[in-house]
Image: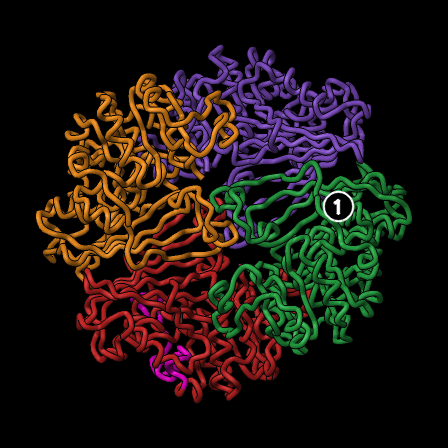
Chain colours: A orange, B red, C purple, D green
Amino acid sequence: MKAAIIGSTGYGGAELIRIIQNHPHLKLGMLVSTSQEGPIAKIYPHLSHLAASLEGLDLDQLCERNDLIFLATPPGVSREWTPLLAERGKIVIDLSGDFRLDRPEVYQKWYKQEAAPVEWLKRAAYGLSEWYASEIKKAQIISNPGCYPTATLLALLPLLQNKMLDVSSIIIDAKSGVTGAGRSLRQNLLFTEVNENLAPYKVDGHQHIPEIERFASQAAGEEVHVNFIPHLIPMSRGILVTIYAKRVSSSYTTADFLNIYRETYQNAPFVRLQENLWPETKHVRGSNYCDISCHVDERTDRVIVLSVIDNLMKGAAGQAVQNANLRMGWPETAGLEFSPLFP
Amino acid sequence: MKAAIIGSTGYGGAELIRIIQNHPHLKLGMLVSTSQEGPIAKIYPHLSHLAASLEGLDLDQLCERNDLIFLATPPGVSREWTPLLAERGKIVIDLSGDFRLDRPEVYQKWYKQEAAPVEWLKRAAYGLSEWYASEIKKAQIISNPGCYPTATLLALLPLLQNKMLDVSSIIIDAKSGVTGAGRSLRQNLLFTEVNENLAPYKVDGHQHIPEIERFASQAAGEEVHVNFIPHLIPMSRGILVTIYAKRVSSSYTTADFLNIYRETYQNAPFVRLQENLWPETKHVRGSNYCDISCHVDERTDRVIVLSVIDNLMKGAAGQAVQNANLRMGWPETAGLEFSPLFP
Amino acid sequence: MKAAIIGSTGYGGAELIRIIQNHPHLKLGMLVSTSQEGPIAKIYPHLSHLAASLEGLDLDQLCERNDLIFLATPPGVSREWTPLLAERGKIVIDLSGDFRLDRPEVYQKWYKQEAAPVEWLKRAAYGLSEWYASEIKKAQIISNPGCYPTATLLALLPLLQNKMLDVSSIIIDAKSGVTGAGRSLRQNLLFTEVNENLAPYKVDGHQHIPEIERFASQAAGEEVHVNFIPHLIPMSRGILVTIYAKRVSSSYTTADFLNIYRETYQNAPFVRLQENLWPETKHVRGSNYCDISCHVDERTDRVIVLSVIDNLMKGAAGQAVQNANLRMGWPETAGLEFSPLFP
Amino acid sequence: MKAAIIGSTGYGGAELIRIIQNHPHLKLGMLVSTSQEGPIAKIYPHLSHLAASLEGLDLDQLCERNDLIFLATPPGVSREWTPLLAERGKIVIDLSGDFRLDRPEVYQKWYKQEAAPVEWLKRAAYGLSEWYASEIKKAQIISNPGCYPTATLLALLPLLQNKMLDVSSIIIDAKSGVTGAGRSLRQNLLFTEVNENLAPYKVDGHQHIPEIERFASQAAGEEVHVNFIPHLIPMSRGILVTIYAKRVSSSYTTADFLNIYRETYQNAPFVRLQENLWPETKHVRGSNYCDISCHVDERTDRVIVLSVIDNLMKGAAGQAVQNANLRMGWPETAGLEFSPLFP
């Protein structure tokens, strides 16, 4: 099967190329860019061994020559193109935020732009692979989760679903490497500004909050509001979320929480429960793994959950391919079995 | 006046040398090391322009040739030496944790070793310069605060003293550069392990917790327990604490909190209130400044406070010299007026 | 076929595990360590998804349960173990320096320790895959090249063999990431010392010099002596060598040099010639590629050649597997076809 | 005396502010920017403790309110403004490249733009403080050297003046931190691109070559051509040049070369000769020092010289203030006596 990538020149697009190139069931199809042209090696010299070239956005070509379409585009692009592609029968996996919220007014509030038509929003399956596999397996549009929501929800959902947390007490202190901001030219992303620096940002509201709250509320069976503060870390890849929440019963121990995770993820090939150590971003770098651990602080009656992913992999391209595997009926791990790059 | 440094070969000691060398009222006295000898330039080639050499620990020499003694030593050393020096009439500024807790059993629980005699613990002034200046000005022993407690307490105390927070709701997510761990040879401190990595540590309890709780409780007038989770950031210097707490009244706005800070620190030369941007560690690197900002999240009724310092400066050597200035009656900023090194 | 790794806890060993785990024809056999025991996930949490455990060094077990033996050990270990394994009929790929020099006295001079017996030195094929494939294909002992010699010789040999350089004029300014120094606890390898630093080292002689000169001389047909100065770069992986040499004829243009490279490496899947850009280490990070480019400076009559590799891949584990592929008659690229990890 | 800075928003300008703010004889005058306005704290939050604001470029204001003018501007600006300021009697210290070459055609060839009028080029003193102090002391225009030429010439000139090198054999392999490229928005300067990367650049010609050759030739008394290849290092500050050259006599030892440096720089407060260790950039970071060491390789008859500076200090703002000190008759070290920031 041939997979096209719209938005091939961003980091998410480059990561999709890296994965698909070695996938047992997928071949690279069209590499689409609206901003640049020429051989992919000109844009990404690390891909000099590939012969592929960038092409413009052409709906007919896309539909004729490709079976699966990945969109790794800025907000607002997928909203327009996904319906066109879906109407022509293509399976679309959208890595942007355009189809993650089902209520247009919420999208508009947080993304500060027009939402996709509500009927299309309703048709998208949310691509958190470990939780929505049955929807993903039959969806025509798969909305790949945001990087922060992936790390957060994999850690939160088991505890919410099992009613172990006071839902009004959830605080998510999130830390991300710089690829989360893409390849855009902004002064605060220059090496000289990021290196030897640690910077909180969007303290007054990040667009991943409604996405987290939507699925957290669904799992909890009641409305959940969270604090979510992201921080920019001087590294290229990796997300760590440190989650703080009150346990509902002071009889719950660390072991109880670990057991819930163990049960929930016993058949999840990419979630690794860590029991004797705390997760670190480098333990998952370049891979599709999510490492989770937790600790109950008896002094304050809170549980602290730690969850790490590679934001470009499980937080973007890796999970997108995992979803393609689910959708196509291939082994969930196809093309994703490689280990993290350490150190 | 001559200042001796015991523990000259650690990063805190080197930073003291850097400051004292340019201080208008202090001269470098004995540079003491128990582990190494020879010219300081051999240990720290960046100090090649200084002629000073390391000397062994000799009580008589220390007392005869120096007026002020800084201890930048591992836990357990100051406990023994500070009483000896104080009995001989020397003013001691201790950068270790040995005199920060007034109850020996608490010290023993968190530091896993014997505490200093309780009568000596009681005689030490806590050197958080902006809060305990009157005690510092007459103390013979000044116990310099820990790096994390400095960043945390400067942010918390104004709000606790003014009864603006639910004291059961305080969560401190702390992030530190690697110099916080000193110059010791540990595998997890190797460049190859730290670089491109983000690692939580001591999730089950850090020895700075009782120090924070001691002074937070004192300011609040009631017992305070906090969650405090530290993280190792791939940078050399800098601490950021992100503090989350419930406001006691939902009428308190961001402006109200900022006003409290403004009033509290109007005469504090090293606390800079940031109103239109979030503090970043690089804005204070190499300097004695602490930058603070805050934001009220109306959705969750919590205030988020951000506080940054350079852990080796305001978090160690810089505040130690600030305390020396206070104690000697010199201008509080003497020798500390230089700007951060940026970028 | 099963491959054992002796020295599994170093970075080279970990990289071998990463590659072999996904190799189409190899399976992980014994993971040997003399210093540590227990599950590999305890030493390397990034490998938590693997069930493998470390075992002690046992000759019988090694020979019974494994077909191929990789040694990723410090100098002096392979010297003793390689003959024992070879005598039992095992194919040995040695990543250490013990079999790279054919004259024991040269080894002793540069490595400051006893050499392997000369008859064994003579039996080892030098594993620079692109140049010694015919020897490698029939060797029982393959001596995998050093990281610096790999980057250097791939750039130098084509020009020396074609008599294009003044052999007395060769200067190699080499730069390496910190993994080149392994996982050992040394103060100069701490994050705090390496970060924001650039350090030349072994200016008075590095043990890779005789290795470079041995094979450079062989290709040139005359004795070659080079200047070689290595520098430690604040990054984890990657080597760049900047080579300066006089061209023998001032009629040779940049295009002439590029042509020689193009001809030499037309069938070499891992050498990528770069014509319109200068090689950067990140373009090959995590992969087995070597990128080469060059430029003639007419003003000084010198050619400058730039060559980059990932020191743990083409400079160690990657080339070792490439050699295993050659030796076994598998496709040269088996298990090594993945792209660099960027960014 | 009041010092104005034209080009206050670049890193060189910010560094001048940092130094002048603590200078015993200088006060901050006008901070000029043509691109931005408002308080300096808005552009550089690390300077939040300063009340200064940016002003537009106004010749009358500049001349009325300031005694000394520093220009830290891109190429082409100083060419126009320096003559205007000099004609009004102001002392100008130009940190750009506009007055470093005395022949307009050479400037035009390497800078790809029009040169300043030749009569003005002739009036500028070259501000390599240790070598041209007598000219600097009476100059109205001081042309501050480039960062690479500073590190290179301090290492080369003593050996050239003493005829110890074969002038046709000089190779300069130069490495720089990223601040050398300024604060401009370019993709190759993003953190994600620079971090974990090592990149040669301008391999076919860097504009600092004619500056190096001009003063090297002058010292040698004959025309000198050099190879000079710069590399971008993943760090913010620091330059290391590794210089390779043939000694003219094989009787010259390392000690002989060190003696020449010792004699040459015996009264130079900012040049530190290192004899038992190799210079590292971190040893001078944030300071005005230049550390130099060397080694003779008997095998190849070459001397290797290593020289490090902080590119923003001795390579820009620090040396500019050193020149102001010389020009004004103040102690050469005034305002520059602080130690490097380590680590």
Q: x%, y% of residue A77? A: 32, 37
Q: Mark 1: which secondary structure?
A: helix
Instruction: Count the numbered circles shown.
Output: 1
Q: Amino acid at mark 1?
A: Gln
Residue at figure coordinates x 48%, y 48% from the top left? B190
Task: Tell whether position D335 is magenta.
Answer: no
Q: Furthest-left residue in view?
A: A221
Q: Name above or below for residue A182 compared with residue C301.
A: below
Q: Name above or below for residue D213 compared with residue B274.
A: above
Pick the front one: C269 or C125? C269
Q: Does any portion of residue D274 appear in the rendered image?
A: no
Residue A126 sits in quarter: top left
**In the image: residue B31, left or right of residue B179:** right
Q: Chain of mark 1?
A: D
Residue bearing the label numbered 1? D108
Q: x%, y% of residue B162? A: 25, 79
Q: x%, y% of residue D194? A: 52, 44
Q: x%, y% of residue A131? A: 18, 36
Task: Tell whether position B130 is magenta.
Answer: yes
Residue at figure coordinates x 30%, y 28% from the top left? A321
Q: Which residues are magenta?
A: B106-133
